Amino acid sequence: MKNLNTSRQPRAERAYGLSGAAWLLGLMLLLLTAGLQAQTLRQLDRQIATMLASPNTAIVNEGQHLQSLVADLYPTLYIIKGELSYNGGNYPVRVECDAASITSLYQPLPSYSGVEIIIIKMNSPAELGARVDLTRLTAFSQLKYIYFLCTFDVCPEFNQSRTCVEDRLSPMLSGPGDGVMMMLYKVSVPS
């Protein structure tokens, strides 16, 4: 009969019957799923420029569409201090809201179904405490972009460095999102 000396097996393998490779695979899966929950913020102008410079025609077309969504006139639902007003029709493609009205985005309104972009206007540092729960945006079936437009110096001490702005805006997003939605921002201080 063969002598099974378990003292030479690694502790994890003895305790759980798993090899080192299985533990490593499990750890990698855990880190991968944790990374999927973090949303990446992208600077709007840089993202559009990247898309327009792509050799892929579909990406260029999407970059042109994003640029148009931000700059051109589209049917828009404005939500200011919780009050809704439509401009251009009852079926908006854009929603523009202030930070105080973010919870209005969680309502199951039929007019949200065709919205492709939510523009959240941030007017003061105090509004950086607002939160957008991506899991509660269920009425937005066509949503592609969430765009934070900051009209104040988010990081004046760092001359609006990209990492500083992203570090200050990232905590505003909670929930895993759907992996398709793009998170964008721009700091545009009026002169």
Image (tube, rainbow, N blue to C red):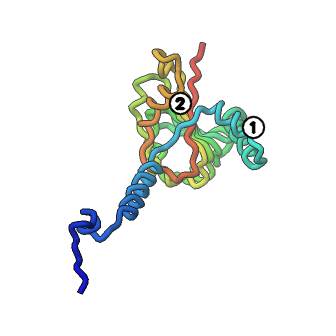
Judging from the image, what secondary structure is the residue with disc 1 in?
loop
Question: In which quadrant is the C terminus drawn?
Answer: top right
Residue 129 found in image quarter = top left
Q: Earlier in the sequence, mark 1 or mark 2?
A: 1
Number of other residues with Cα within 10 Å of mark 2, as a class: few under 14, some 14 to 19, many 20 or more: many
Is 15 on the left-hand or right-hand side of 179?
left
Residue 120 percent coordinates (x, y): 53, 34
Q: Residue furthest bottom?
A: 1
Amino acid type for the residue under numbered disc 2: Lys
Judging from the image, what secondary structure is the residue with disc 2 in?
strand
Residue 88 percent coordinates (x, y): 68, 40
Q: Nearer the viewer, residue 138 or 79?
A: 138
Amino acid type for the residue under numbered disc 1: Ala
Question: In which quadrant is the N terminus drawn?
Answer: bottom left
Residue 152 percent coordinates (x, y): 51, 20
Residue for point 72% across, 37% down:
68
Which residue is identified by label 2?
Answer: 121
Q: Is residue 48 above or below residue 144?
A: above
Q: Is residue 3 above or below residue 156?
A: below
Which residue is identified by label 1?
Answer: 53
Residue for point 75% across, 37% down:
53
User: Disc 1 to disc 2, how far (Cα)?
Assistant: 28 Å
Residue 128 — which label?
Answer: none
Residue for point 46% across, 15% down:
157
- Front tag of 1 and 2: 1
Residue for point 54% across, 27% down:
162
Q: Nearer the viewer, residue 48 or 77?
A: 48
Residue 18 found in image quarter = bottom left
Q: Are marks 1 and 2 in contact (CB under 8 Å)?
A: no
Residue 58 percent coordinates (x, y): 75, 49
Number of other residues with Cα within 10 Å of mark 1, as a class: few under 14, some 14 to 19, many 20 or more: few
Q: Nearer the viewer, residue 123 or 38?
A: 38
